[in-house]
Amino acid sequence: MSMKRLAHLDDISGAAVPPAYDPAAHGCGIVHLGLGAFHRAHQAAMTDAALAADGGDWRITGVGLRSRTVVDALEEQNCLYTLLERDEAGVTGRVIGSIAKAIAADPAATLAVLCAPETRIVTLTVTEKGYGIDRATGGPDTDNPVIAADLANLDAPSGVLGLLTVALSERRARGCDPFTVLCCDNLPDNGKFLKGGIVGFARLYDAGLADWIDGNVAFPSSMVDRITPAASDATLLDAQKLTGCSDLCAIETEPFTQWVIEDNFPQGRPAWEHGGAIFVDDVDKFERMKLRMLNGAHSMLAYAGFLSGHRYVRDVMANAALAKVVQRHLQAAAQTLEPLPMIDFETYAHDLEARFRNPAIAHETYQIAMDGTQKLPQRIFAPAMDAIAAGQSLRPFALATAAWMRYALGVDEAGKSYDLRDPREAEIKTVLADVPRDGERISAALHEHLQFVPRSLVEHAEWRETVAAILGDILDKGIGAVILAESD
Ligand code: CS2
């Protein structure tokens, strides 16, 4: 007999903890763009805690911008799903009730809900590449096909900047207060970043609208953190044990969770502090710490670990030489940071190592390795430039960059090829097409023709020599030998 699908709180017959409130008694107040695993493990869980402790009409309408799969499955479950937390001590489950509705790849329905008066906050996890913002200018990237299509057809936008700008314009025309826009992606100054994209998008066709958004819409920055691997068969099996139902939307994560938010919500907000959120005046320093330490070390270990044949982060950490190089990277990144009164970077680094080692979390190096061109600038290049300016060693950052370059060849040391899963994969292939397998030549091609490494690094002799030399060694001696030497 096939097992009943989770769809009602009464269905739960296992140890999973149901929401401590009646979801149906709360209206919606948030639209979330990007309904991936991370949102369900982080903002939706915090909102669930806020609803339980403080109530309010703050349930979420989740929008999957591209794919139907998650949305269809959620709809079959009345948007209920199990969130598993795993560590050495075992696994616990909680059923989350904060998502009320889900919309898939439907721009008209998305626009309608963005314009609804009850929508007071829009949160986003669309990944670094999902915005279509040009990092160099801070405005919309008009060469991006989605941005170009939305500009050509403002009546039916489908991209992030188009949807939000058109919705804000519509609300203004109707005399309805604007929503607060809360970016939850791993980007520095993410509130300012998204504001620049939206104001810039509006300015391309309506200067009055651009000025109005600039003066009237709040874009608080936020730092988000929770390590959330893609769900696996083990996730679904454990969710089934804990709920007594089949749950195709279950996800798993680590116990740790952090959300540091700039408290700027003119239209109100859920009491997210009940889920552990911290409200501060200035998020930037927290964001930089997390991006450079957690995400920087993650990217480095993902490339070095993947090339060394390690499938999961926990396997990378179980290798003594790699673990030492991770430790060195964390220290080097910490040295580039301004002090944060509430945080001891040494303790933070130590806790990160423990989180990376979590034996119960199967986080694939290949998952973290994706979108390198979108991640390296803020994770590796920015701290590298600060390290150089402060006279600190650039070597840890050069190693991370060389490991990415080796990964960018698209074939591992056993000769097996793989997709880079990077929006610039085709360009990378073109740039490397006729380049011989030589550290100096490959590094030069990737430094000079992709325009994603900052000029000050491209022109920095010691940086260039170090990256090229490490890449040369990886190609000649293998990643294992290089990591062993670096860990000494
Ligand atoms: C990771 C992040 O995939 C990646 O690039 O570095 O998703 C990381 O797991 C989260 O930012 C942790 O909060």
Image (cartoon, rainbow, N blue to C red):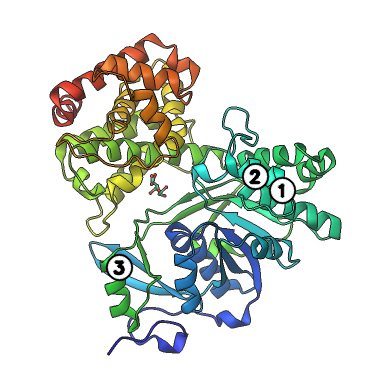
Q: Nearer the viewer, residue 456 or 271?
A: 456
**CB of residue at label 2: within 8 Å of ligand 1?**
no
**Residue at mark 3:** 235
Q: CA distance from mark 1 to mark 3?
A: 42 Å
Going by the numbered disc 3, the residue's amino acid type is: Thr
What is the quadrant of residue 18 in the picture?
bottom left
Name the spot of residue 121 as percent of width and height, x first: 66, 59
On residue 414, which mark appears? none
Q: CA distance from mark 2 to mark 1?
A: 6 Å
Q: CA distance from mark 3 to mark 2?
A: 39 Å
Q: Is residue 56 left or right of residue 467?
A: right
Q: Nearer the viewer, residue 56 or 422?
A: 422
Q: Is residue 21 left or right of residue 440?
A: right
Q: With respect to residue 387, does 163 lie above or below?
A: below
Q: Is residue 190 left or right of residue 438?
A: right
Please identify the quadrant where the N terminus is shown: bottom left
**Residue at mark 1:** 153
Name the element at disc 2. Answer: helix
Q: Is residue 316 visible?
A: yes
Going by the numbered disc 1, the residue's amino acid type is: Asn
Name the spot of residue 54 as percent of width and height, x first: 60, 72
On residue 149, which mark appears? 2
Residue shown at the point (50%, 41%) measured from the top left: 287
